[in-house]
Image: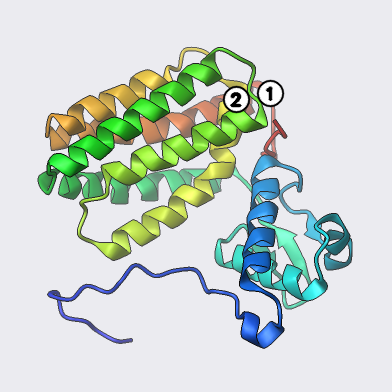
Amino acid sequence: MTVTSPSSPPPAPRLPAPRPEASGTPKSLIVGTYERLRADIIAGRYAPGSRLRVEHLKTDYDVGAGTLREALGLLVSDALVLNRDQRGFWVADMSLDDFRDITETRVLLETSALRQSIAARDDDWEGDLSSAFHRLSRAEERLDNSQPATVLVNDWEECNRRFHHVLLARCPSHWTLHFLSILYRQAERYRRVALMHRPIGRDVHAEHRAVFEAAIAGKADEAADVTATHIRTTYAALVAYAKEHRITQLVPDSA
């Protein structure tokens, strides 16, 4: 392990990049296949625990076996796909226990990062946060006025990701932000289940507004508290839905 001095923090780690020079496959094709596969897994096209057979997928995605294995390797790094003893690839399972672990770890890290980000806020951060909240508000308005559909859910997810990203943008810890990006992406499958079923009595926009108003006012403790409640409410909503419908395995619905 290499130890760096506090005065020169390490850059944020990145997912292992494919090596087109070794495989002969253009990087853009590998990344494009990875993004398509990832979107389909999150949308529930491939159920948790199901096997991903290269011979079938290469026809569905119109790419070669080498490209698919490279893309699946990136999904293994995302922990969305498992490679079991080199015998093949499977979609990672989903469970309420797993989501609780993701939720509580995210609360721990995100509230700390948010306090640090607010402490280092400046005019540019406030402008970026106002813009991100406005875009998220518009996305939530469109979602509230129609039945959930893939394009609307994807638009909301991107605006939601941007809002939370900007909130934490002034946190000085690259490692904290890196681990939070992993947790956020892991939670995406679970968020989609909760979003598609719209639990009665929950106002997600009001939750986001409370976070925004506390953060923009520089009230770090209040912002951290409402953020923790916001993150945990998604878990609670999913638990309630699973109990009501006696669901033992969580599977994202295809919008």
Residue 187 visible in this rendered orientation of the protein: yes
Q: Where is residue 166 in the image (x, y as percent from the top left)?
A: 30, 43
Mark 2 crowd level (few <14, some 14–19, many ≥20, 10 Å Cα): some
Q: Position of residue 34 (x, y in %)?
A: 65, 60
Task: Give left or right: position of 36 versus 136.
Answer: right
Q: Do the residues labelled 2 and 1 touch (CB within 8 Å)?
A: yes
In the structure shown, which secondary structural element does the residue marked by tag 2 occupy? helix
Instruction: List the residue tagged with mark 2.
Output: 241
Identity, as a three-letter code, of the amino acid under mark 1? His
Q: In this view, does 79 lie above or below 102?
A: below
Q: Is residue 137 left or right of residue 147?
A: left
Image position of 77 with respect to 233: above or below: below
Crowding at mark 1 (Cα within 10 Å: few <14, some 14-19, many 20+): few
- Which residue is at a point 79% across and 60% down the rendered structure image? 52
User: Which image quadrant: the C terminus?
Assistant: top right
Viewer-nearest residue: 196 or 142: 142
The one of 115 and 63 positioned closer to us in this rendering: 63
Observer-nearest of 211 and 237: 211
Task: Give the position of the N terminus as an image quadrant.
Answer: bottom left
Which residue is found at the position 51% from the left and 45% from the top?
187
Secondary structure type for disc 1: loop
Name which residue type carries label 2: Tyr
Image-based side of 51 in relation to 137, left or right: right
**Residue 37 rendering spot, x and y as whole percentages:** 70, 55
Q: Residue at x 40, y 23 (%)?
A: 137
Q: Can residue 229 be spotted in the picture?
A: no
Q: Mark 1 points at which residue?
A: 245
Residue 217 sits above or below residue 199 on the image:
below
